[in-house]
Image (cartoon, rainbow, N blue to C red):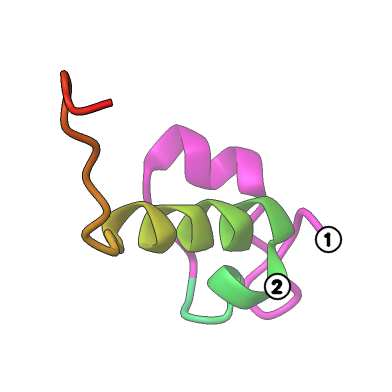
Amino acid sequence: MNKCPYCNTTYNEILQTGFVGCAHCYEEIEPLKEAVEKMYNGKKHKGKRVKNGNI
Ligand SMILES: [Zn+2]
């Protein structure tokens, strides 16, 4: 779903304004949900670093 049934905010509106309509938007609007999940995954580093010249 690209639209929140609680506040009728669409994903495009959120992209344009940068604001969500309500807390449910994060769960109801699929692209937004995925974006948030990706954001959190990106922040989680498991500490696996590859050193150059150590192959
Ligand atoms: Zn909403």
Give the amino acid type for the residue marked by disc 2 in the picture.
Glu
Asked if ligand 1 lies within 8 A of label 2, the reply is: yes
Q: Is residue 4 above or below residue 17?
A: below
Q: Main secondary structure of the magenta part?
A: loop
In reply to whether residue 17 is colored magenta, the answer given is yes
Precedes in sequence: disc 1 or disc 2 = 1
Ligand 1 shown in quarter: bottom right
Label 1 environment density (alpha carbons within 10 Å; few <14, some 14–19, many ≥20)? few
Towards the viewer: 46 or 50: 50
The percent coordinates of residue 54 (x first, y second) are 18, 28
Image position, residue 36 (x, y; %): 47, 60
Say whether residue 24 is left or right of residue 51: right
Q: Residue 48, position in %: x, y?
A: 27, 54
Dot 2 corresponds to which residue?
Answer: 28
* Residue in the foreground of this view, choosing between 26 and 47: 47
Viewport quadrant of the C terminus: top left
Label 2, residues with CA under 10 Å away: few <14, some 14-19, many ≥20: some
Segment colored magenta:
1-21
Q: Is residue 16 left or right of residue 31?
A: left
Marks 1/2 in contact by CB < 8 Å: the verdict is yes
Q: Regarding mark 2 in the picture, which secondary structure is present there?
A: helix
Question: What residue appears at the point 70 percent right and 72 percent down from the top-left corner?
Answer: 28
Q: Residue at x 38, y 63 (%)?
A: 40
What label sits on residue 1 in the rendered view? Answer: 1
Task: Report, in whole angstroms, how far the alpha carbon at label 1 lies from the one at label 2.
Answer: 7 Å
Looking at numbered disc 1 in the image, what kind of residue is underneath it? Met
Question: Which SS class for mark 1?
Answer: loop
Location of residue 50 (image quadrant): top left
